[in-house]
Image (spheres, rainbow, N blue to C red):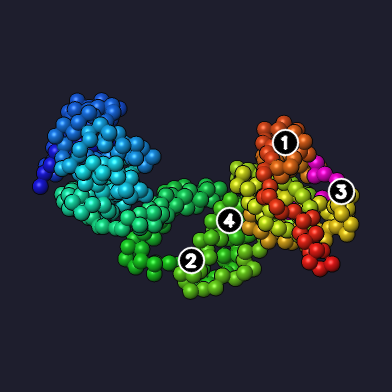
Amino acid sequence: MSFRFGIIGLGRIGSAMLCLLEDAGNIPVWAVTSKQTEALRSFTRVPDSPYGAQVVFICVPDAMISKVAHELADEWGDVRGITFFHFSGLLSSNVLSPLASKGGAVASLHPLQSIMDPHVAKKALKGSFFSMEGARDALVIAKEIVRAIGAEAGEISVHDKIAYHAAAVIASNYLVGLFSQAMDIMHTIGLKQGHLLPLMQGTLSNIEDHGIQALTGPISRGDWDTVDAHLEMLYREFPDIRETYLSMGHYVSGMAGRLWPSDLVAVPKVLSADALEKRAGELRQRGMKIVFTNGCFDLLHAGHVEYLQKARCLGDCLVVGLNSDESVRRLGKAENRPINDQASRAYVLSGLSVVDLVCIFDEDTPINLIEALRPDVLVQGGDWKVDDIVGADIVRSNGGRVLSIDLKEGYSTTAVIEKIRGAYP
């Protein structure tokens, strides 16, 4: 079976598919592209008619697919007899509903492959797996297209596209991220990419032969002393990589059927001012952005947690300056405040995953901490005007940002105390 086709977008996938389809005996009629093409009629926007195309391939970024579908439907009207494919791994064929409503057969067709170089895309797509979902008539054509270019096709449910795409991102994009982290460490001891790649290639070969049974290493054999040594080194030298090691370590220990020792997770979170300043320097060496906020945090409640979550999203490390007991009393809080002593309040804060470091200060304000820390972002609750936030001038003079975050309505420590008193007079 051969057909006449149009193609919208001549990027890496579009250009490769154009060549593969033409090699398989199909006839390209036109392309929508900003590139100069002499061998093919081209348009810079959606053409005013199909010009005889029986199949149209929409090879544009995900955010543009719906727009292109609407433009085609508006421009062409009745599209019965024409089949439309898009190449998004995330979006389903539903995004082409404007064309389906005009009589077109629509489907998604996605190559499970990583394409960087357009010159090797054609070779890479051959032998790859293509997922597909959509209208029956469109899937019949999709299967023939994939077979003709020497690849494999498999149908998935429209409801499974997000899960499918997430798995693809983990297997490809995150693999590159893990490689980058490993190379960050290797570079510090003078090793290069070529030294690490044979290990990764050997691992992929083992996966191909043995699946998840290819797992080796200290966690698989329960060598927790080695893992502990890794974590200590990462805490000192690669704090941004340590969380990835921990996350993957927990997952891998489950694969190996081993229980992750709870003491391997423990790190010092409550630091003295001097230790905090030293730690901040280590974080900055790794390019990590430090966010600072402060408060009493007595009787931690949902408003506190939401506020801290928002603050943590502004950088890579959230430091909380905690008023000491004496500092709280000097602030003129209600009688018998704080309810919880400073050690208890610090311990509770350090138990929150969004809080990276805690430092208790005795002064009325955290100005000395801010001066020593020089955070990249200084944050306070929405009841503070930005210009009135203590330390704003210091942070700004250092090129940092000062922000006021809205607080969750209806929550305050005072309100909690009054509610308890009302219930238990």
Residue at horizontal 60%, vertical 63%? Answer: 229
Instruction: Give yes or no for contact between labels 4 and 1 (Cβ–Cβ under 8 Å).
Output: no
Q: Is residue 205 left or right of residue 384?
A: left
The numbered disc on residue 242 is 4
Residue at horizontal 79%, vertical 53%? Answer: 296
The numbered disc on residue 331 is 3
Q: In whole angstroms, how far apart are the C-alphas of marks 3 and 4?
A: 38 Å
Q: In whole angstroms, how far apart are the C-alphas of marks 3 and 1?
A: 20 Å
Instruction: Give yes or no for contact between labels 2 and 1 (Cβ–Cβ under 8 Å).
Output: no
Q: Is residue 381 left or right of residue 53?
A: right
Q: In whole angstroms, how far apart are the C-alphas of marks 4 and 1?
A: 34 Å
Q: Is residue 394 visible?
A: no
Q: Earlier in the sequence, mark 2 or mark 4?
A: 4
Q: Earlier in the sequence, mark 4 or mark 1?
A: 4
Q: In whole angstroms, how far apart are the C-alphas of marks 2 and 4?
A: 15 Å
Camera-near label (3 vs 4) is 3
